[in-house]
Image: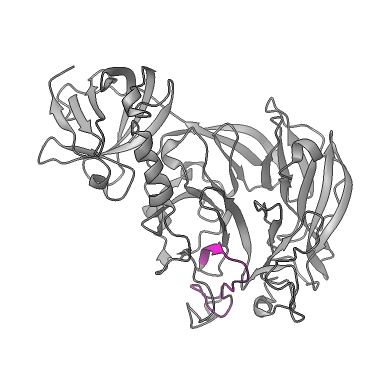
Amino acid sequence: MLFRSAAVCSFLIPLALWAAAGPSQAQVKAPASNTLPTFTAYTVTPVADNLENPWSLAFLPDGRQLVTERSGRLRIINAQGQLQASPVAGLPAVLVAGQGGLFDVVPAPDFSKTQQLLISYACGTRQANHTCLASARLQGNALTDVKEIFRSQPAKAGGAHFGGRVAFLPDGTLVMTLGDGYDYRDKAQDLSTHFGKTVRLNRDGSVPADNPFANRADARPEIYTWGHRNVQGLVWDGASKRLLAHEHGARGGDELNLLKAGANYGWPLATYGIDYSGAIISPNTAVDGTEQPQLYWNPSIAPSGMAVYNGGLFPAWQGSVLVGALSHRMVQRIQWRNGQPVVVEGLFRELNERIRDVKTGPDGAVYLLTDQPQGRVLKVTPSFSKTMLPKDHPLVGAWRIDVPGTSCYEIYDMRADGTLRVVSGAQQADAEFSLAKKPEGEGFYKWTNKITNHNQQPDCMGTVMQTGHEATFYITFHSTGDQFLLCEQANLSACFGPFVRQPSI
């Protein structure tokens, strides 16, 4: 609910959304994409266009943005939102072939001091290629001190399954994802190769002493996890202190995984998909000694970039995982509820564009990259429009809710002209609201509420949001009586008591 007490809010997000600390006990199959509702009202604004298959987006402390183009160019969008005409000079030699090219760009955590970037890319030739990682410094519109710090081994032929996502961990090390090379899938179970692995490195490319295989003569010391197909989504979730990754299945079997040092994720011994030809890759969906996915998609959505939303513009999204989808042309929003991942809604389908990357910006907006020869950077912000209601609409009138376990209460006087008066204890706030019916089901409304003025009640700190703040919450209307329950959790009544009709305010 929008006007929850701070105590209630702090309980719900860490415990309800991120309750699972380890792999789920029962694997969750994602619902079909075409069945997912869209609850959130948003506006999509173009930032830049005419980018050649953009692959990764990063934000710099001074307001600039970096965009990689798979064709081998690194571009800068200045702090005023303008795409610079000239690409950044000084990149290492990039192999552009098939799925190969320039991949991720990640600023070092201390970029403000060091100007260091980490850049992943395909390198070598089509007959003998690798996934490489370079360190460089950004000086103006050029890279300096460019050094290759990692090269996957052995070389492979062909232009498929490079991986290439990079994420820093809190200890200052970084993890990079590597694909199985497509024709080398059995090597994902071979610790003497980098195929189908993630690797953990120090910023200079050296091997951390506590890597899980650092002291094994039969294993590559850089390996962090193994048994992957083609991991192209990787994000460290600071709130839950865990590393999440997703990977492409074959025909079905895309996976969302919780990465643990030294763990084997099963490919190709266990999979929820089949080969593109229809042949069986493995009869097993689970094998002893391997990890099960937190969530799997069948059919495949072709997952791409991934972000954990931690901004302020979409309060209902806090802690949600946003997963881009190439083939299904959307972003799926996922929350953890009672230890299980739940795909809550499907977003941005109206764009009908392949989503390559998704990021939370420092301004709280969500940013998207679209994968096409004339790709775009898009900015997503909340949208709001006041709703006029018939005077006999069931929501028109005054309603009271008491926050269980506290002395806090609120009264909402919803008016037919689309305005709202909120009384929280002795304090009041004015607002406007926008209503929309849920795509399926009766009596379920989306109500985007914009507070325009308020005085916060000291005894119920946080029950009224800040001036000008927008948020979304959900009201369930029971047609048998005047009762409205609101909550962002699956069990509505567990959060708040019922709305009770009041005299007009």
Viewport quadrant of the C terminus: top left
Q: Nearer the viewer, residue 107 or 269?
A: 107
Residue 201 in the image: state x and y as whole percent.
74, 60
The residue lying at 84 percent from left, 33 percent from top is: 140
Asked whether residue 344 appears in the rendered view, the answer is no
Is residue 150 shown above or below 477?
below
Left or right of 393 on screen, residue 324: right
The residue lying at 82 percent from left, 51 percent from top is: 135
Residue 325 in the image: state x and y as whole percent.
54, 53
The residue lying at 73 percent from left, 29 percent from top is: 78
Left or right of 287 on screen, residue 118: right
Residue 307 in the image: state x and y as whole percent.
56, 48
Is residue 441 shown above or below 458?
below
Q: Nearer the viewer, residue 470 or 81?
A: 470
Within the image, what quadrant is residue 206 found in? Answer: bottom right
Q: Is residue 423 magenta?
A: no
The residue lying at 77 percent from left, 80 percent from top is: 217
Residue range of the region highlighted in magenta in the rendering: 254-276
Name the main secondary structure of what is drawn in magenta: loop
Residue lying at the far left of the rendered structure? 480
Residue 174 in the image: state x and y as whole percent.
70, 56
Q: Is residue 274 magenta?
A: yes
Left or right of 10 on screen, residue 85: right
Viewport quadrant of the N terminus: top left
Asked whether residue 24 appears in the rendered view, the answer is yes
